[in-house]
Amino acid sequence: MLIVKPDSLPRLWWLFPWSVCRQLHRNCNALKALADKTDDENRLLRQEVTRLAQSREHWIAKHDRAYAVAMHNERVIADLTK
């Protein structure tokens, strides 16, 4: 797990500009890695939601077909008993 911590700059940072550049580079890379990880998690969640929605639609359609068959069978039986 990446943890982005605000590191303090050296006391006389203007005397050591490369230290500031190195720190900014580390912070940017950590933020980029965190953003990539979040994007991956969002993509996986979106896929799971889509899969569940399709599964729900599948079972609803299956139920509707079974109900239609049952109603048809009841009508056929009712016609035969008349």
Image: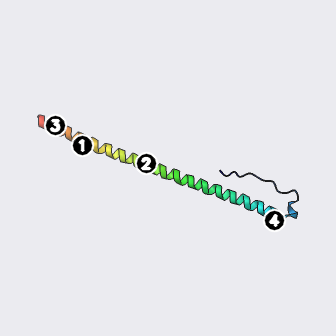
Q: CA distance from mark 4 to mark 2?
A: 52 Å
Residue labelled with disc 2: 53
The three-letter code of the residue at mark 2 reads Ala
In contact (CB < 8 Å): disc 4 and disc 3? no
Whether 58 is drawn above or below 80: the answer is below
* Mark 4 Cα shell of 10 Å, populated few (<14), some (14-19), many (≥20): few
Residue labelled with disc 3: 77
Q: CA distance from mark 2 to mark 1?
A: 25 Å
**Which residue is painted at 28% across and 41% down in the image?**
67
Residue labelled with disc 4: 18
The three-letter code of the residue at mark 1 reads Val
**Reading the chain from its start, which is encountered first: label 2 or label 3?**
2
Mark number displayed over residue 69: 1
SS for tag 3? Answer: helix
**Which residue is painted at 23% across and 39% down in the image?**
71
The three-letter code of the residue at mark 3 reads Ile
Horizontal arrangement in the rendering, residue 2 relative to residue 57 (left or right): right
**Reading the chain from its start, which is encountered first: label 4 or label 1?**
4
In contact (CB < 8 Å): disc 4 and disc 1? no
Give the foreground label among 4 and 2.
4
SS for tag 4? Answer: helix
**Reading the chain from its start, which is encountered first: label 4 or label 2?**
4
Task: In this rendered view, identify the residue nearer to me: 20 or 70.
Answer: 20
Give the foreground label among 4 and 1.
4
